[in-house]
Amino acid sequence: MTPATSKRLVLVGATGMVGGYALRYALDDDTVKTVTAIVRRKLGISHPKLREVLHADFADCSTLSSALSGQDAAVFCLGTYTGTVSDAELRKVTVAYTIEFARVLHGASPEAAFSFLSGNGADPTGKSRIAFARYKGEAENALIAAGFPSVYLFRPAYIYPVEPRKEPNFTYRILRAIYPAFRVPFPNLVVRADELAHAMVDAVVRGSERGNRVFENRDIRALVKAIHPYTR
């Protein structure tokens, strides 16, 4: 990655855990000129670089065409947790929303670079028995086929929340509790939410090479250390 001229960035999922860190990081980053946050509810913050666009239904993003025009980069963090919604809702959020947003963004800003929050085990072949893996793989395939010059697919394993929050289920409560000990012997199976967010922003605003790339968990950690050598 090399320094770049200031970029206009659009962010989806800014009210979520990773998206929230991406928003704060982008607003503080001198290489980001403006941040257009597409949100379903107000962020409750003000910043001279921030443009907030309320949009209720990601099943139809046609009305976002004007807001998405002239963007240089996109960070897409919209998603939901397995087990908290029905299978149909999981596929809609993971696949349909991603495809619809990408369709409108490409029409409005065809040269934009795209960072996508996928997940560990994402299966582009569609053969996995795990719905989450199939749907993330399906979304990845759609993004690559959309025609963007660069698509960065981020596949984190366990994402450590950093700040206290209400965990979505029992498994996440256990993972949070054992994280301090678990990350020492298994560093490539965990990543901090803030560092993942930084990597996703850095990829699209500092990347100089066109093309598609998959970042597994170990690659995400390496990217963070390459750009921020004094990170944890």
Image (cartoon, rainbow, N blue to C red):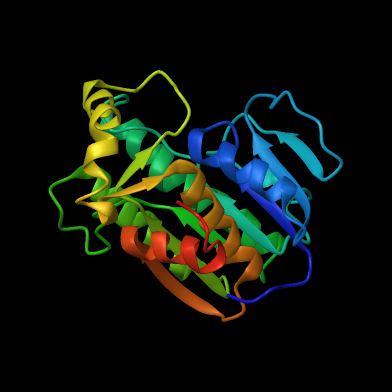
- In the drawing, does residue 114 fall left or right of residue 45? left
88 lies above or below 67: above
The image quadrant that residue 205 belongs to is: bottom right
Q: Residue furthest front?
A: 230
171 lies above or below 213: above
The image quadrant that residue 39 belongs to is: top right
86 lies above or below 91: above
Q: Residue 42, can we see it?
A: yes
Instruction: Identify the residue at image location x=47%, y=63%.
Output: 225
Q: Residue 2, position in %: x, y?
A: 63, 77
Q: Residue 167, position in %: x, y?
A: 35, 22
Instruction: Identify the residue at image location x=60%, y=73%.
Output: 207
- In the drawing, does residue 166 fall left or right of residue 11? left
Q: Residue 132, position in %: x, y?
A: 26, 44
Q: Residue 147, can we see it?
A: no
Instruction: Identify the residue at image location x=69%, y=41%.
Output: 37
Q: Residue 127, position in %: x, y?
A: 15, 58
Q: Residue furthest right?
A: 48
Instruction: Identify the residue at image location x=55%, y=53%.
Output: 198
| Foreground pick, 5 / 177 | 177
Quadrant where the N terminus lies? bottom right
2 lies above or below 227: below
The image quadrant that residue 103 belongs to is: bottom right
Q: Residue furthest left?
A: 129
| Foreground pick, 120 / 177 | 177
Q: Residue furthest bottom?
A: 209
